[in-house]
Image (spheres, rainbow, N blue to C red):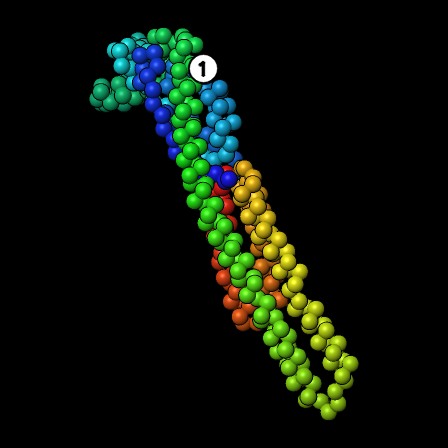
């Protein structure tokens, strides 16, 4: 079962007189890139929250938003009035004609303008917050699982298309060699004497040069392995990307050896599906 790199999860709960809402969302990324926005009250737990998200989400460009609303009239922060006044006086010296309201907006955002009135975080509140965090991540992972199932079906369809095109190559291989023999014989007929041994040497040379048996076998193996990884491994996005690269090498070699219009058409179709596989594999965890 594969998981999608993109996901969204939301959870809400009441904890110690506060309504807590958490949103978790992610997009594609090579590693774990976390943007964490939490209230000042929970800053002391930031490291632990980051660790939990890293362990459970694994990979992606993740946004984590924690919002708190008081429901009992209490507030956990207070304005440092003297600090704000000092900021406003200094700002007035810089911009003499500025409106006081605008200066207040700026001063309130500066360091030490706001402080916590009760910075002590109880164990009960922390455990309640942890429960909501895990619920949000559970919902996030469920979203990833649903998206991953759809993504897996699409990837399998693309791989099966390539396998189908590969089986269509064989009928054209014999015709391709006959065409090559006719061209060689036509060229040799321009001379008075034909060295039969030399002719068959040339035919053998081109038969070996244009042979795509190994490429077909390896490409078929890569396709089977790709499907096995989708069904049996977790967090396989990077591995699927590597397998797709190997598939691309065999398809390119097959195209360079094709020497036949219909085979070239099949190779183009294979490349088209391979590009879709590469694009979608970037979204696999």
Q: Nearer the viewer, residue 210 or 161?
A: 161
Q: How many marks?
A: 1
Which residue appears at 34% of the width and 20% of the height? Answer: 13
Which residue appears at 64% of the width and 64% of the height? Answer: 212
Residue 163 vs 104, above or below: the answer is below
> In the image, is 284 to the left or to the right of 110?
right
Residue 229 vs 133, above or below: the answer is below
Q: Position of residue 112 (x, y in %)?
A: 37, 13
Q: Position of residue 160 (x, y in %)?
A: 51, 55
Q: Position of residue 168 (x, y in %)?
A: 55, 65
Which residue appears at 49% of the width and 19% of the height? Answer: 48
> In the image, is 62 to the left or to the right of 91?
right
Q: Nearer the viewer, residue 48 or 232?
A: 232
Q: Position of residue 282 (x, y in %)?
A: 49, 44
Q: Nearer the viewer, residue 214 or 188?
A: 214
Other residues around mark 1 within 10 Å, as few (<14) / some (14–19) / many (≥20) = few
**Residue hosting label 1:** 44
> In the image, is 69 to the left or to the right of 227?
left
Q: Secondary structure at mark 1?
A: helix
**Is residue 87 shown to the viewer in this render?**
no
């Amino acid at each position: 079962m594969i998981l999608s790199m993109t996901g969204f999860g939301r959870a809400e709960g009441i904890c110690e007189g506060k309504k807590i809402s958490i949103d978790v969302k992610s997009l594609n990324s090579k590693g774990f890139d976390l943007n964490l926005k939490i209230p000042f009250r929970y800053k002391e737990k930031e490291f632990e929250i980051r660790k939990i998200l890293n362990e459970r989400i694994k990979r992606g460009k993740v946004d984590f938003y924690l919002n708190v609303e008081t429901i009992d009239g209490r507030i956990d922060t207070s304005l440092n009035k003297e600090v704000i006044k000092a900021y406003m006086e200094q700002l007035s010296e810089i911009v003499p004609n500025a409106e006081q309201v605008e200066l207040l907006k700026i001063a309130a955002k500066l360091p030490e303008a706001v402080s916590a009135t009760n910075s002590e975080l109880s164990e009960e509140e922390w455990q309640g917050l942890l429960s909501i965090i895990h619920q949000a991540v559970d919902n996030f992972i469920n979203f990833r699982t649903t998206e991953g199932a759809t993504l897996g079906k699409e990837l399998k369809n693309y791989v099966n298309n390539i396998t189908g095109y590969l089986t269509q190559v064989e009928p054209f291989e014999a015709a391709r060699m006959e065409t090559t023999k006719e061209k060689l014989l036509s060229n040799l007929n321009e001379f008075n004497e034909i060295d039969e041994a030399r002719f068959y040497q040339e035919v053998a040379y081109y038969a070996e040069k244009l042979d795509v048996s190994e490429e077909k076998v390896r490409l078929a193996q890569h396709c089977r392995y790709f499907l096995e990884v989708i069904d049996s491994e977790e967090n396989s996005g990077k591995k699927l990307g590597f397998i797709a690269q190997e598939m691309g090498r065999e398809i390119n070699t097959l195209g360079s050896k094709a020497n036949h219009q219909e085979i070239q058409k099949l190779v183009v179709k294979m490349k088209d599906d391979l590009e879709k596989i590469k694009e979608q594999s970037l979204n696999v965890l």
